Amino acid sequence: MVVRSPFPYSPTESECEKAAYSYMIGLFAVVVALPLPIINLLTACFFYLANRRATYFVRFHSLQNVVAQLPLFVANSVGFWWTVRVLLGWWEPASDLYFGYMLTIILANVIEIIGTIYSSIQVRKGQHVEWWVFGGLTHFFCKP
Amino acid sequence: MKRHLFHTLILLVAFFGCWALLARVPWTKMMGYKPQVDSVEKEVGNLAWRAVGLQMEAVKDSYYMAPLDSIVTRLCEANDIERKEIKLHLVNDKMVNAFALPDGHLVVTTALIDTLRHADELAGVLAHELGHVYHHHSMKSLVKEVGLSVLTGTVGGGEQARRLFKHILSTAFTREMEGEADEFAIDVLFNSDINPAPLADFLYRMWQENQLEEAVLEWASTHPNSNKRATRILEAVKKRNEKEKSSQATTSFRPALHATTWSKWKEDLRQL
């Protein structure tokens, strides 16, 4: 899911710190604003916008965080509003389909959190990491 | 680019595949999950029944309730419906009607029973109203028409509550809800070994009388398109019979009530 790969240049200490923050800030947002799915995405977007003129290393990792958050935001939003409908009770009771979906997005979120922590640690050490699927999409949007 | 699209596709397949696999696990059964009736629906249901009770005389004598109760119990037991969640009421009124209120209240008038020719027709009407109860149509209609905030505001009672429940009695369900209740009734009747054809006969008879008479029977006025519904029910019976013929299984229908019980009960209700 998350692989180490070579980077065009060796990032400086401050770059590594900033890039690591892009992952950590998302985790803090999740802790503070759970279960609102949009907070995590907004935090990642704001961080990227604040650093869009920064070095390639910082831009890449902050954008990679945004790209990884997007599908999760969609999945979590569906889960959030489905839960609201179930709690209201009149339109549909909880079903096996609902519980299956909630477990799937919990699994996706857990994988994302583990990936974020790992990425943050590696990036802080100066090691470039790319996420499966999202790393490639980030390369598409972020050029050196 | 192609590689990225392919990887994205794999990720999507993995997500939906995981969901599909986890959805096959019987979580609700394992957890013993039962949907709880919302407290607002409970309160609205109680208030609605109280409002009805002010306008109509409830028949509480178990002697008169017993045949009605036996039909509803048979329908519930054959279809895994919790009998205690259905609050059955018989009211002594000239209005030919049966209607469902929120929170499982089911009201039948003595005039309706007098109009029906066969106990199976009554079973069909009850099965139809059970469909409205099962799908929470009363509550859904109310929320759609008056809004949730109004409903929660009327739980305390007062003039607004009285106006609201006048609305309940006059509200007709949507065509989709009526269709849903009809489908439910057909399944429930078949599972209870009660012939659904008499329900179709009753609907068709009501449609004919509605066409001919100026005095509109209340049940017919809140249940439009009775002739189309009658046709649909008869088609469902025909389909089921054909299915049974091909599988060589046979459903032997049993009457909802014994003929003697039915005629004696109708006679006794007329004396009320």
Image: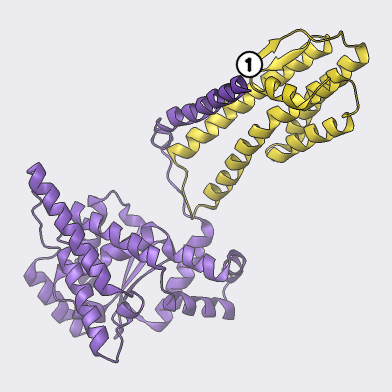
Chain colours: A yellow, B purple
The number of numbered discs placed on residues in the rendered structure image is 1
Q: Position of residue B3 (x, y in %)?
A: 60, 19
| Residue B82 shown left or right of residue B267 in the figure | right
Residue A140 sits above or below residue B161 on the image: above
Q: Secondary structure at mark 1?
A: loop
Q: Which residue is found at the position 21% from the left and 67% from the top?
A: B231
Q: Quadrant of residue B87?
A: bottom left
Pick whichever, A89 or A22, lies toward us.
A22
**Is B138 situated above or below B10?**
below
Q: Position of residue B93 (x, y in %)?
A: 30, 83
Position of the C terminus of chain A by quadrant: top right
Quadrant showing the N terminus of chain A? top right
The residue under the point 8% across, 48% down is B245
Read off the residue under disc 1.
Answer: A1
x%, y% of residue B11? 56, 24
A12 left or right of B135 in image: right
| Residue B192 seen | no
Residue at (11% x, 76% y) in the render: B264
Residue extending furthest toward the bottom: B214
- Residue A10 shows up from this direction: yes
Q: Residue at x 42, y 45 (%)?
A: B34
Q: Is residue A109 left or right of residue A27?
A: left
Tell me the subunit letter for badge 1.
Answer: A
Q: Nearer the viewer, residue A130 or B42?
A: A130
Say which quarter of the image contains residue B196. bottom left
- Report the residue that reaches farthest toward the front: B2
Q: Tell me the crowding category of disc 1: few under 14, some 14 to 19, or many 20 or more residues within 10 angstroms, Cα based.
A: few
What amino acid is at disc 1?
Met
- Residue B234's spot in the image, x, y percent? 18, 63
Instruction: From this view, report whether residue B164 is shown above or below residue B79.
Output: below
**Position above or below: B27 against B114:** above
Q: Nearer the viewer, residue B31 or A34?
A: A34
